[in-house]
Image (cartoon, rainbow, N blue to C red):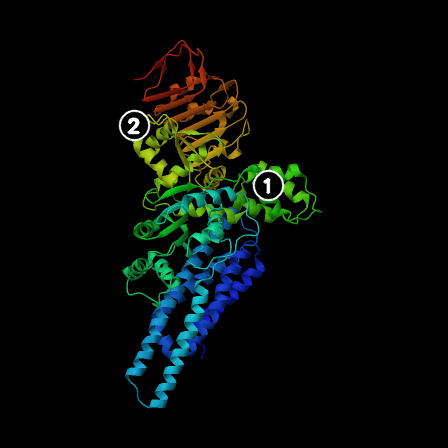
Amino acid sequence: MVNPVDKLFDELYIVFKDLIKKNIEFKGKLEGIEAKLEALKPVIRDMVQNNEVLDRSRKELTGLTGVMESGIKLIGKCSKFRVWKVFKKYKYANELIEWEKSLESELVILNVQTGRDVKDIAREVKENAGVAKETADRLKNVETLVETIEEKLDRIVIQNQPGEPKAWMSTEVPELPRLTVGLDKHLKELKMKLLKDGGSMLVITAPGGSGKTTLAKMFYHDHEVKDKFTKNIFVTVSTKSNYIVVQELCQKLGSQESTFPNEDGPFSWLKEFLKETSQIPLLLILDDVWSKSESLLEKFNELSIQSNFSILVTSRSSFPSFGSQYPLNALTHKDAMTLFRHSAIRGDKSYNVPENLQDKIVRRCKGCPLAIEVVGKSLCGKFTESWLKKLSDWSKGASIFDTETEVLLCLKSSLDALDEKDQTIKKCFLDLGAFPEDQRIPAVALIDMWAELYGLDEDFLSIQYLQELSSRSLANLVVTRKEKMEADGYYSEHFVSQHDVLRDLAIFQAKLDPNKTRLILDKCGDKVPKKLTEQNQSFQTRILSISSDGVFSTDMHKIQLSDVEVLVLNFQSENHALPKFVGDMKNLKVLIVTNNGSLPAELSNFQLLDSLPNLKRIRLERISIPSITKNCIQLKSVKKISLFMCSVQFVRLDLK
């Protein structure tokens, strides 16, 4: 009789194999999961064949059974799509990753609890010994099963797919990439900082896909580092619990305990070990540490202070409370070109792609190593026409995330990790996409926006969110004048910058929103998407951002977006007129107009603001307002007007 667990596993395995054949879109991800199922197959067989072990582990298998059932349903959804749209493509890729994490979590539980249950059986056999030979044979069989199952599960638990988010921790150090570009200078600086004294912590921080892990591996393998430290340990933390991380670390250091009774157990063992070996220099590299692991760093930091124990951390979060920070910047264009050619051309001298075409594609990757490698591999071996097609798609508004799901999933995970209890911080990140590329964003402009959108009526609350985004490498908060600091409530010298790839991520996420809460029109000129002129369109846009290299035509008055609360206009021309549709935005609360030219530009149609009953905040930068009317403009609800490098002539404003 076929066991139901065994039967369910076989069904899951078969549908996965079938999906891999039919869909190439996520072949790498699916094959990674298939490898785990392949390794799990003999474990299930061993457990099923020994009913005694299966009975003891049936409760644990309930969780694994549920995960397998949900996997079969998910594969059924995926198999219905041959060519996935961007939204569906991202949606199912995300669900596959979450499902894989659930599978991995169940395997960790199974690894610990199955070993415990089988050892309990062995103890009972000894305690209830009957016929000597029969007891000895039974005990031998059980002990053999213990070793077999634990060995197979251990092999599965330490697996990780190269280049993918690590869902559990491994103490194995993968080989360095064949080519490392632009990191030698950083390696030298890291050695200067961390090799000086023992008992220190250094945090390498940068957005996902920036090369943090590669730099950490270079540090681990460096000869000077190995000469300095007697013992080097590399641990990938990711989303694992503190208990699992420290337990694996203890085992790497020589602990004979397979499991500890509670979470304090491995820390106690580690503390005692470091005390006994206090004269031995030890290096611990904690890779891919997420913000929720701050308590883990706190304990390690205490240990490093008390012993000859140095710690190198890589993270998307800065952890300012622990050690020194080392921000990792984007690649220079020269290094980016080297990495791209390695990925796309691979030394093939006969591969004739114009250098200017390579240059244009690399510039679109914005110095992000992950994006450069992924795009390069996708073009490797393709005809020049495929390269031109990719550039053409990008020029028409397509994003790198539309085609390179691996880059999207890597960076999107930083957003997913933001505090679910406070969704405002995620909204604040997405709002940054409303401002032009390669331009510093004045913090006071964001303060105006967020005060009206999210009720952040105290300026410091907005700054706090910006500081949080900065600490997670999702933005950079810069203060240009140190004399006036936050304590004085003076934020005119605070500016926000953002890596271009992160801005692209914010815009891409805005596109996926069916309600178009944030509508961002880049370099549209007179071109207005047809849907925006339809009276019955269902957009619920709260933020509208329009950027242009030239003049906005007043013909844009056909736009129908009455729910807009924040309007951001960016242009670069000598003369500019407010679009006529502004006069119909009865819910508009914040108007931000920025001229990115070097001299003030003339702004006309200013009288349209007279008809906006809810307008509360106006910010103008490099704007010249001429004598537009002899009559007073009544701004009934306005409570703040900010003018930066503006020229204002004879404008009569009545602020009632």
The answer to whether residue 309 is above or below residue 46 is above
Classify residue 125 by image quadrant. Answer: bottom left
Which residue type carries mark 1? Met
- The residue at which mark 2 appears reads as 489
Residue 494's spot in the image, x, y percent?
37, 29
Q: Which mark is residue 305?
A: none
Residue 55's spot in the image, x, y percent?
35, 76
Left or right relative to 37: residue 619? left
Residue placed most toward the observer, 287 or 293: 287
Q: Residue at x 47, y 61 (%)?
A: 159
Tell me the mark number nearer the camera, choosing from 1 and 2. Answer: 1
Farthest-out residue, right: 350
Q: Residue at x 48, y 26 (%)?
A: 570
From this viewpoint, is residue 638 visible? no
Question: Dot 1 lies on which element?
Answer: helix
- The residue at which mark 1 appears reads as 337
From this viewpoint, is residue 160 visible? yes
Q: If you read the primary sequence from the N terminus, does the residue marked by circle 1 or circle 2 appear first? A: 1
The answer to whether residue 563 is above or below residue 250 is above
Question: Dot 2 lies on which element?
Answer: loop
Which residue type carries mark 2? Gly
Quadrant location, the C terminus: top left
